[in-house]
Image: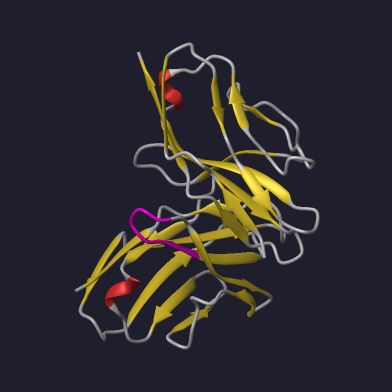
Amino acid sequence: EPEVTQTPSHQVTQMGQEVILRCVPISNHLYFYWYRQILGQKVEFLVSFYNNEISEKSEIFDDQFSVERPDGSNFTLKIRSTKLEDSAMYFCASSVRGGGEQFFGPGTRLTVL
Amino acid sequence: AQRVTQPEKLLSVFKGAPVELKCNYSYSGSPELFWYVQYSRQRLQLLLRHISRESIKGFTADLNKGETSFHLKKPFAQEEDSAMYYCALSSGANSKLTFGKGITLSVRP
């Protein structure tokens, strides 16, 4: 059964460094999402992406964040200059249609020191 | 704004006991409601959605628009039901999911 994959599983970085989190959505899916979960808190929506552009973003998704689908299979989340408060689990998800079931990846744990 | 409230953090029951995981939502339009489950060391996965009105692994959930609730129920809990359960809402139009804080269900033998 096809699954969403994410790499790396754990990323440790220094404050102020750039990180790129990678996701490979399920191949026939058209809608892509990033969520994050700070330890002990709820899963929060960051951004949705459809037809090669952002369709919605949350207040969390400020100018430090960007997303890209560089090659038709990967979907990346870049954080330009990481802050301590960016430490969280980041989940990628994809769906066939908007509003439909979203399939989640296993997550990348980002630790900012 | 859309909001999902799961008032309890933890529910611990014995095997065979009934389970009810509470979920209330706030949304002015017609939402789509979901329950997602995360078993230990596994990814978030869909358990059920209100529009399908089906029972999955013995769990059911009914959307009550009057009470704005979507409680998850199972008459007889099993040990393998132990997991984190998240209620989520989608407005459909923009398709993002708004999650509750989640509840840990622990089923003891």
Return the x and y of residue A46 as percentages of the image width and height: 52, 70
Measuring 70% from the left and 53% from the top, which residue is drawn there?
A100
Give the number of marks.
0
In-image side of A10 versus B18 (left or right) = left
Identify which residue is drawn at 31% across, 59% down: A9
Q: Which residues are magenta?
A: A35-41
Task: Tell whether position B7 is magenta.
Answer: no
Q: Position of residue B69 (x, y in %)?
A: 68, 40
Question: Which residue is at a point 66% across and 60% down the rendered structure image?
Answer: B2
Q: Residue at x 31, y 81 (%)?
A: A82
Residue A38 sits inside the magenta stretch: yes
Q: In the figure, A12 relative to B22: above or below?
A: below
**How was this image coloured?**
secondary structure
Q: Residue B89, position in %: x, y? A: 65, 52
- Name the quadrant of the N terminus of chain A: top right
Q: Of residues A52 and B22, which is closer to you in this image?
A: B22
| Residue B33 image offset from top left, x and y in percent | 68, 46
Comparing A73 with B67, the one in front is B67
Q: Is residue B78 above or below residue B90?
A: above
In the rendered image, the quadrant that contains the C terminus of chain A is bottom left
Q: Quadrant of residue A55?
A: bottom right
